[in-house]
Image: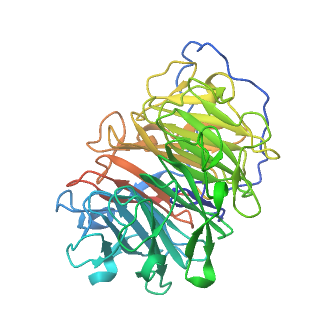
Amino acid sequence: MLAGSLVAGGLVLLLADGDDDRRTAMRSRAATTAAPPPPAGRLRVGPAVGRLVQLPGRAGCIIDEAVAGCARSRGFRGANDVAVAPDGRFIYVASTRSDAVAVLARKKRRGALRQLRGERGCTSDRASEGCALGRGLSGPSSVAVSLDGRNVYVAASGSQAVAVFSRNPRSGALRQLFGSSGCVSHARGEGCTTGRALPRPRDVLVSADGANVYVGGNGGVAVFSRNASQGGALTQLAGRAGCVFERGDACTIVPGVADAVDLVESPSGRQLYVASADADRLGVVERGDDGSLAKPTQPARCLAEAPRAGGCEAVRALRHPRAVVVSPDGANVYAASQEGDAVAVFRRDEASGALRQPAGAAGCIIQAGGGGCAEARALDGVADLAISPGGRNLYAVSSKINTVSLFSRSARRGLRRLPGSRGCFIRGGVLGCSLGRGLTQADGITISPDGRNAYVASEHPELGGIAAFRRIRD
């Protein structure tokens, strides 16, 4: 597990990169159709703004094996999520296979990465390659940095925990908080505080105001307050306010939040959108002044590929959603359908946060066409999405065919693919795409807060790691 600008475990930070944000959002009342319409043809070609160029030589990728001219990683084999610090000077990498979080320095001019030396360069749940030893780090899949830059939070499914680190803003180094403040776990052990609704956590999100941390997983969404004056320590909200789920008495009941794999906050901070992979749903949750979450009072509380009970609205291209992002202007929400090989497009009502899918080809893009969606290339197994800080580009990574797909975006004209080979990167350089290195089993993508770089995390144990790209903004 982050899009729209800085992505940190799904956190959208509204930082300018020179893109034109002055276009106003168009609103539509078009409803989705019950029966799938015929194929809608190929997605239109847009301008080449936002194209990517992979950094040359060893600067272009960091992986465990010395192949493809990449730099060598240390303490992590394959990567699942990347978060960039707000000042853009350091990035943090979660590696599920290595039970580790790594720290890399970033050169702002080109975006090249260099792993810190010694124990500052990685923290692991087990002794490994000179890494510092941490707790609650078995199987980390998501990493997030607080907007004030003081903390890093890591969601680890193996430990059923969220690990809490303080961060040195000058060196980028991490130090896990002392004692039980250093982690919150679903099960007792490792000296962690015991938390609720944390079975197999998949994503962690720090709210833009820094007041709360949200952890999504098989148990729905766990809700914590964050105490910046006490090193960023977490306290779960009491009673039912401490979690949201679809059933049971222990949590607030909200449809569409079971099996949460990705969370994103609206620009106003008043809503959270939750991708629920196994349920084929996209949940909409209201956020209160104290950070608690509740079922919205407006219609379209959740969206689903095949609605069952729970009041969800039927939409297209939402099979096994793996990621969700919100545009910086708040006009659109996009969801990645891993099993549908598609990206679902929604228009967002600014007042209520409710979502509506446009009719026809404007409502989705898909690998092979069909369902009335527009057809695009290299979307087989979409695993993650990111939006540039100014909102002019959407980027998608696909794990099945090791690709990055590039789209131009506007609230008025929707999504359009970048022309020719500039429209996608792929390992092996086929399908009319540019050749990309370090993309094997691409699992996550993050855009730097200055909009200059894109970083792709790929999870293959030998050929996966971090691929680094320069973003052309004009």
Give left or right: position of 123 versus 358.
left
Where does residue 447 sit, x and y in percent of width and height? 51, 59
Where does residue 58 sit, x and y in percent of width and height? 27, 66
Location of the C terminus by quadrant is bottom right
| Colour option used | rainbow
Q: Is residue 106 above or below residue 220?
A: below
| Res 297 quadrant in image | top right
Residue at 47 percent of width and 64 percent of height: 83
Give left or right: position of 128 versus 247.
left
Residue at 50 percent of width and 84 percent of height: 169
Q: Residue furthest bottom?
A: 170
Question: Which residue occupies the foreground of this view, 378 or 303?
Answer: 303
User: Number of callouts in the render?
Assistant: 0
Q: Residue furthest right?
A: 351
Residue at 43 percent of width and 76 percent of height: 107
Residue at 29 percent of width and 41 percent of height: 429
Q: Is residue 28 above or below residue 65?
A: above
Examine the rendering and report whether any part of residue 413 can be seen.
no
| Res 90 quadrant in image | bottom left
Give left or right: position of 55 versus 265.
left
Where does residue 59 sit, x and y in percent of width and height? 32, 67
Q: Residue furthest front?
A: 249
Where does residue 189 sit, x and y in percent of width and height? 36, 68
Examine the rendering and report whether any part of residue 5 can be seen.
yes
Give left or right: position of 188 versus 153.
left
Q: Is residue 126 above or below residue 445?
A: below
